[in-house]
Amino acid sequence: MQNTEIKELADRLNLEPEEFRELLALFVSSTREEIGQLREALSENNLERASQLVHSFKGAAVNLGLNEIAAHGEKLQAAIKNLEDIDIESLIEKVLYEIERLAGYL
Amino acid sequence: MEKILVVDNHPMMLKFMSDLLEKKGCEVFTALDGLSALEILENSVPDVIFLDLVMPNINGEKLCQIIRSRPELEKCFIVVLSAIMAEKGASFDVCNADVFIAKGPFDKLSAYVSSVINHIEQGEEEKIKGHVFGGEDLFEREITKELLASKKHYELTLNNMSEGLVELVEQSTIVFANPAALSILGKPEEQILSADFTGLFKSSDQALILGRIAEAKSTGKETELDELVEIDSKQITIKIVPVSSQNSHHTTLVILRDVTQEKKLEAQLQRAKKMEAVGTLAGGVAHDLNNVLSAIVTYPDLILPQLSEGSPLRRPILTMRESGNKAVAIVQDLLTLARRGVPAKMTVDINRIITEFLNSPEYSKIKSYHPEVEVTTRLDKDLLNLTGSPVHLSKTIMNLISNAVEAIENKGNVEIITENVFLDNPITGYETIPAGKYIKIKISDTGAGISSRDMERVFEPFYTKKKMGRSGTGLGMSVVWGTVKDHDGYIDIKSEQNSGTAITLYFPADRREAEPEQPPEAEEDLKGSGESILVVDDVREQREIAYTLLASLGYHVDAVAGGKEALQYLREKGADLVILDMIMEPGMDGLETYQEILKINPGQKAVIVSGFSESYRVREVRQLGAEEFIKKPYSLKTMGRAVKRELHKKVGGK
């Protein structure tokens, strides 16, 4: 069930593919959870908490070398800061899309 | 084999770190937040601790401080793993950590962690102390800065509020406490964080607090403890606010307020109000008593000269006069308490009052009952004067010194100190004494002391621990209180049972010279020579007494019961002098009557009589020309003297 993308990512981090997969699984599950909490924080207008949540999964994405998600995360933080609702929603969608795509490899 | 603790709130990071470190043969413990880390640290001491800075339930920075404050964890090597350290300037001072590693891609992270572990295994940790690994890779600077800025805003608020705020998790474990809370709880942050909140209180309060926390959690509503709880001899109120959000941890906020000072002030106010009420009541009673007593005090003066030396009536009447005078003293004390009378505004030298009392027969008498009590004085030669009533102040000093001497059963010391003091800051003792310049009088004894229960009531009238009869009217301390208050002064009491009491009076200082002492009066002739006198008083007995006294002195006396009758009498007959009662009911009072009299006969000589000390209405009459004023109950001497002075004053002069 090896996937070329997984292998590439694992290689870049000097990790065994199996090890990488385990870490990725943890990343996917926590990020899903964090996105849920992020939506709630936004609905409560708790911007500090929202920013912390993005900060958390963005950092984890950097750890795993998932630069696309990290970049979305950065834009997301800017959008939260400027209260750009449309951007926030579309960015969250993009992150979720990436997460689910990666989840497909597990 | 190194023992390692990793603390990070991301499960992926924990997994990565434990895999990496276990591969190197280390024993690894992991914790998702600061609080669970502290639990692990209770039971084991790791060689190295890796920790994240941003975490729930005690963040990394605080965790670092706590670890550093515990001697048993002194040897732990602390590595901070974080993405936000660059914004904090990687300040080792703030965190007290040994090494920083910037979070980045796992390959780099793995290299940095390995390097740290290798150095430690080879005993070369000194080489990497203070080192920052991977600082150049941080790219999220901007945003974390904002995060920190908003955090700073909250921190500023929390740090500067006067209420203590504590955050609890689980049953009652503290994960946050603001500076006000630390000062109320009286412990440093390192000891407070991760401590059990309820455990900080007396065991009798613990169940109460725990019950309320549980109640708040189950109802989801904030609640407040009905009673005050005590901690560190501070009285505090506790408010509990449950915080439940679907995504965040269930926490409880506790708001603590130190109300010690408030309660103290409340008690002071209540005490002052009580004294005020008692004073008003006492004044009312005293006024009536004065009239009743007049007969007892004055008739002996009239009867005694008519009795032969060997008369069997002599002794009983002398006793009657003595008892009457004692009763007058009590009434005078009550009147002082009533504070209806405005004390004379004279310049007074307190040192002189003290010395005079110590040389008086009263003092010798008290001292004779307590021969083993040594009384010493330390009087400030340059003591400033104060403005007020010498009579009341002497009484105050007399009461305090007598109390001090009488508080000592056998052997002991009484010390009397006077000095000028300048208070830079207010003193909060029995009362709150504002900053300023004062004359301080301290009278301390090594006697029985006052229990804290009695302390509350020590100034109340008739609240006494002394044997009645030997000394005192039961009003001594009440008079002290009344006098000090009349002179805008303050009282402080410090007392310990069985080791003594110190009472300190503070009076506002005055720089004026003391009035010279009155020259002692020579024996005088009080007899009149048939001058006509009209007595105006609404009370029949008073009229009779005045009539008898004045007639016995050789005056021609008539008496009427009110202002209206007096005016009529004066219009028809006239009188050389009018004895005018100040308070008459119903109808015109003394002032109104005198104003009317002056219309008929400007320059009418008059003597004012009143049961109260000089009031502003009395002063007004005196300004109108009736200079003589005597207080009821009066003796033959005071009445005779006043009448004579008024009759012989120069006409036209005031």
Image: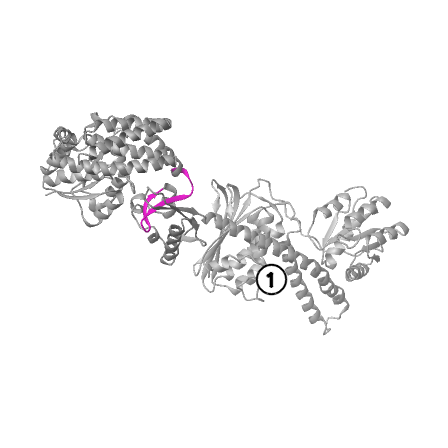
**Residue B608 among magenta residues:** no
| Residue B525, picture quadrant | bottom right
Where residue B346 appears, x then y in whole percent?
63, 45
Front residue of this view, candidates B161 and B23: B23
Please give the name of the residue rendered at 66% of the width and 59% of the height, measured from the top-left corner: B331
Q: Nearer the viewer, residue B260 or B316?
A: B260
Which chain hosts label 1? B
Name the spot of residue B64 as percent of width and height, x first.
Answer: 25, 40
Report the residue marked by disc 1: B473
Above or below for B201 versus B155: below
Picture quadrant of residue B87: top left
> Which residue range is magenta in the image?
B159-177
Residue B124 vertical placement versus B374 (above, below): above
Residue ID at (72%, 59%):
B635
- The quarter of the picture where the N terminus of chain B appears is top left
Task: Give coordinates of residue B543: x percent, y percent.
Answer: 79, 59
Secondary structure at badge 1 equals loop
| Residue B164 falls inside the magenta stretch | yes
Residue B269 image position (x, y, % from top left): 54, 50
Quick one: B157 or B223, which is closer to the camera? B223
Taking B596 as reference, is B295 left or right? left
Amino acid type of the residue that numbered disc 1 sits on in the rendered structure: Thr
